[in-house]
Amino acid sequence: MAKPIKRRARVTEEFKRQAVQKYRDRGKKEVREITAELGIVNSQLHRWVKQFPEELKDSPRASKVNGAADLRTLPDADRRGELARLRREVAQLSEECEVLKKTIVVFARTR
């Protein structure tokens, strides 16, 4: 027997903005708690956060996204410095990844 097709609930832009505001003001509350309260999934909230960045402007979280400064808010000299730092970090992580790949090959041979 075929499962009934779930219809997506349509939400208003106001609801989305309120959800982003709730995310912004969450304090120590985890994202999954907020999404459970709102009856949405984590990916929806994250998509809305990207869709409405202006809701996060005054937030302490606005200056950092995934541990990196938001380059749009930095002066030119700081942008170049942050970009250089991020490039060094990417190079280091790429190198670590290559070492791990080689380690996996070595351990796979010994078994």
Image (cartoon, grey):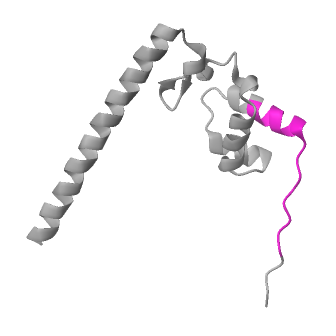
The single residue placed furthest to the bottom in the displayed view is 1
> Residue 44, relative to residue 27: is it above or below?
below
Q: Residue at x 69, y 15 (%)?
A: 58
- Where in the figure is residue 81, as x and y percent of width and height? 40, 15
Is 19 situated left or right of 102 in this image?
right
Q: How many marks?
A: 0
Is 108 situated left or right of 33 in this image?
left
Query: Looking at the image, can residue 92 be seen?
Result: yes
Relative depth, front residue between 95 and 13: 95
Relative depth, front residue between 78 and 50: 78
Quadrant location, the N terminus: bottom right
The single residue placed furthest to the left in the displayed view is 110
- Where in the figure is residue 77, as x and y percent of width and height? 46, 8
> Residue 68, relative to residue 6: is it above or below?
above
In reply to whether residue 7 is colored magenta, the answer given is yes
Residue 55 quadrant: top right
Quadrant location, the C terminus: bottom left
Is 34 situated left or right of 80 in this image?
right
Is 53 situated left or right of 13 in this image?
left
- Where in the figure is residue 5, as x and y percent of width and height? 83, 74
Q: Residue at x 30, y 42 (%)?
A: 94
- Where in the figure is residue 65, as x and y percent of width and height? 55, 29
Q: Residue at x 51, y 10 (%)?
A: 76
Magenta part of the chain: 5-20
Query: Looking at the image, can residue 63 be seen?
Result: no
Q: Residue at x 60, y 23 (%)?
A: 61
